[in-house]
């Protein structure tokens, strides 16, 4: 999510509730809906309470419970933290992030799903629960993960959740001994903390961000979508780049791949994951998986430096300090705050 910077000449913030869709559209688009959109919401609005009850998400209006007990899986220990976002009036929003940990398989899986749009919290929870069901019956190879993502996304699009302008990212890290796979859709991030000389650490990126630049931009344009910034009332471009249908100013996503987002599919948005394989070494000491709210204002190398101070015995303190730094970074740079969720994994070699 993008927020306006603090400053004497900062213009007013626009609609907060759309998250990564329609953030800076002119007022006419915020207050007028096409007949198609009105029909969509009228037909599905009655189903949302049913979906909430079915997924047991009535308590998801505040923070999801973080796992603060020390968790051990073989030569791995992990901690989770999650924090709801704030609007510019410092009011807490629905936490649209979900996380998944599967530790009873031949391999270990850690995943984060960052929802966006009005029903993003439903989408991310749907992805979590349904991927868990599907993956539990799989062996965890690359091709099976691609099939899992495709099948769960198809199931989502057929569900009672209104996904016209709502969706979710999805990133998962699979660890089987020395073999690590990172499977990603969207703009969440995973990094590996690798020890260098003199006990310094380097942040190794485990995934590509699906932003509308380079090959991803070319793919969207070839499909027939548009890649443009929003413009302010004076016609000046406002970052970031967003994806639109050719002849309609929807959906306005800042990522090129996501789950759900039926409107985005018409502009070239896909849910096909990129998968990266890494052979872990004795110097690969920790792994961090996080929603974009964690990395928005924090540098990966600085994060590695912070975490390394607490490796290998103080993973709880490392997680607490990282969350504290993330919160401070939002206060320093802008008004409001995105949801912040991460899984920190220590690896003992």
Image (tube, helix red, strand yellow):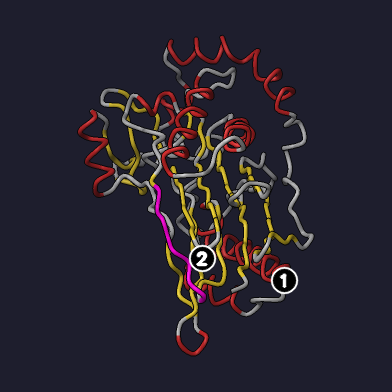
Residue that appears at 63% across and 48% down: 85
Taking the image as shown, residue 52 lies to the left or right of residue 296, namely: right
Q: Quadrant of residue 176?
A: bottom right
Above or below, comparing residue 180 to residue 328 in the picture:
above
Residue that appears at 54% across and 15% down: 41
Q: Nearer the viewer, residue 107 or 45?
A: 107
What residue is shown with label 1? 317
Q: Nearer the viewer, residue 14 or 97?
A: 97
| Circle 1 Cα neighbour tier, 10 Å, few/some/many (<14 / 14–19 / ≥20) | some
The dominant secondary structure in magenta is: strand
Q: Nearer the viewer, residue 18 or 243?
A: 243
Taking the image as shown, residue 127 lies to the left or right of residue 54, namely: left
Q: Which mark, by number, is residue 298?
A: 2
Question: Magenta stretch containing residue 211, yes or no?
Answer: no
Above or below, comparing residue 342 to residue 211 in the picture:
below
Above or below, comparing residue 128 to residue 89 in the picture:
above
Q: Position of residue 141 (x, y in %)?
A: 46, 44
Q: Quadrant of residue 312?
A: bottom right
| Circle 2 Cα neighbour tier, 10 Å, few/some/many (<14 / 14–19 / ≥20) | some
Q: Which residues are magenta?
A: 275-282
Q: In this view of the protein, can residue 264 be seen by the observer?
A: yes
Taking the image as shown, residue 170 lies to the left or right of residue 240, namely: right
Q: CA distance from mark 2 to mark 1?
A: 18 Å
Q: Nearer the viewer, residue 233 or 237?
A: 237
Q: Give the mark nearer the N terminus: 2 vs 1.
A: 2
- Look at discs 2 and 1 and give the one toward the viewer: 1
Residue that appears at 57% across and 37% down: 135
Q: Position of residue 112 (x, y in %)?
A: 57, 47
SS at badge 2? loop
């Amino acid at each position: 999510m993008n927020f306006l910077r603090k400053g004497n000449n900062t213009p007013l913030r626009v609609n907060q509730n759309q998250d990564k869709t329609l953030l800076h559209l002119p007022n006419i688009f915020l207050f007028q809906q096409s007949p198609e959109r009105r029909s969509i919401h009228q037909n599905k609005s009655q189903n949302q309470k049913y979906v909430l009850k079915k997924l047991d998400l009535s308590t998801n209006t505040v923070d999801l419970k973080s796992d603060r007990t020390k968790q051990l899986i073989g030569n791995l220990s992990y901690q989770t933290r999650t924090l709801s976002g704030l609007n510019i009036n410092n009011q807490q929003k629905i936490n649209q992030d979900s996380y998944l940990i599967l530790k009873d398989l031949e391999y270990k899986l850690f995943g984060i799903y960052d929802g966006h749009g009005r029903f993003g919290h439903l989408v991310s929870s749907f992805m979590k629960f349904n991927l868990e069901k599907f993956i539990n019956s799989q062996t965890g190879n690359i091709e099976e993960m691609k099939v899992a993502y495709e099948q769960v996304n198809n199931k989502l699009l057929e569900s009672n959740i209104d996904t016209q302008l709502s969706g979710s990212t999805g990133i998962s890290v699979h660890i089987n001994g020395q073999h690590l796979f990172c499977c990603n859709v969207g703009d969440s991030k995973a990094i590996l903390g690798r020890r260098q000389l003199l006990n310094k650490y380097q942040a190794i990126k485990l995934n590509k961000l699906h932003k509308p630049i380079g090959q991803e931009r070319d793919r969207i344009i070839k499909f027939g979508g548009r890649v443009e910034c929003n413009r302010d009332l004076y016609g000046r471009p406002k970052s970031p780049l967003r994806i639109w249908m050719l002849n309609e100013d929807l959906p306005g996503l800042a990522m090129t791949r996501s789950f759900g987002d039926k409107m985005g599919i018409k502009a070239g948005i896909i849910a096909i994951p990129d998968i990266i394989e890494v052979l872990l070494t004795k110097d690969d000491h920790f792994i961090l998986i996080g929603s974009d709210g964690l990395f928005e204002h924090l540098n990966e190398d600085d994060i590695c430096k912070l975490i390394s101070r607490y490796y290998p015995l103080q993973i709880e303190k490392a997680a607490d300090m990282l969350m504290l730094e993330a919160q401070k970074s939002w206060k320093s740079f802008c008004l409001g705050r995105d949801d912040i969720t991460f899984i920190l994994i220590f690896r003992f070699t």
